[in-house]
Amino acid sequence: MVLSVPEERFEDVPDFDYEPQYVDVGGLRMAYVEAGDEADKAEETFLCLHGEPTWSFLYRKMMPTLAERGRVVVPDLIGCGRSDRYEDLDEYSVEMHYDALKTFVEELDLTNVTLVCQDWGGVLGLSLATHEPDRFARIVPMNTGVPDGTQEMSDRWHEFLEMVETAEEFDIGRLVEGGCYRDLSAEEVDAYRAPFPDERYKAAARTFPGLVPTSPDDPGAELMAETQDLLGEWEKPAFVLFGREDPITSHDRDPLRQHIPTATEQPDIWIDEAAHFLQEDAGEEIAEHIVEFVDRTSPSE
């Protein structure tokens, strides 16, 4: 069964007055918001992808600065935010999420894209960028990685997996707050709860951790292995930005930066006082770094 989130759930979301739009990605609607240049005039396009279990609201602090430089497109992954979702957990897979994102980018015909991606937004976005390189000009991986099943998962990750899959009370707002360095307001915590009226709407949030390949034979591992190989051959600009206080992915930062050939050509920057959801902790600072990255890697007039 496919569920749609009632729009009234988002009436009290603070500081996010963007009109939602929708793209059919194969029987489900993928929601997105955008800002900045009109589509037919944009010289630069920023595609901002969130991860588990957030939605486009996560990028609200970055959108104004990026919009001064180009078009900003921020979708909600299937099962997140305003996007439609399957109630059945078995409907979710790496392939489903990847195909939905690919269709979204193709339907909007996004080109000259600077990919800004975090967590699962990075897993999926980096896969798409490396497999569809003609659409992408640059990549900005943040607090993410490309798990191909050969990586070792920490005890903390296994604890997180068990909690997400089995917790009777799965408070997504508190989960997001726990992944931030700074304290969130009650209104911000509620904004992360907004897309989930009840347990039926949480299937994607419940399944994302279990979709991480932990063996090369797992579903999705082949796509991730291909992505790893293609990232190792990436010749366009890449700027790796991680939060220093993220206990989940900070150890992936240096290996990723060394793996992507062009990443070490950019400044070696950590985002201080920022944890897993670094867009919440330091969104304005990160957006400024990204605009500077685009400026210094744009062709000369």
Image (cartoon, rainbow, N blue to C red):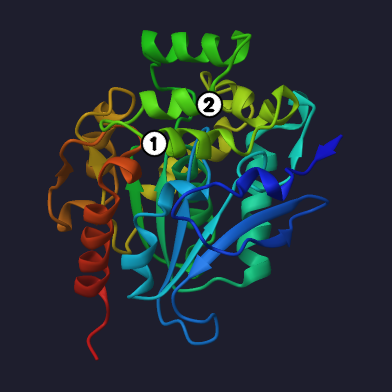
Mark 2 secondary-structure assignment: helix
> Which numbered disc covers residue 172?
2
Where's the C terminus, which quadrant? bottom left
Residue type highlighted by circle 1: Gly
Where's the N terminus, which quadrant? top right
Residue 222: name its quadrant. top right
In this orientation, which residue lies closer to the viewer: 60 or 259? 60
Residue in the picture at 38% in, 37% down: 144
Residue 240 place in picture, x, y as percent:
26, 48
In this orientation, which residue lies closer to the viewer: 85 or 208? 85
Residue type highlighted by circle 2: Ile
Q: Is residue 232 left or right of residue 102?
A: left
Residue 116 place in picture, x, y as percent:
39, 55
Residue at the left extreme of this rendering: 268
Mark 1 secondary-structure assignment: loop
Residue at the right extreme of this rendering: 1
Residue 262: name its quadrant. bottom left
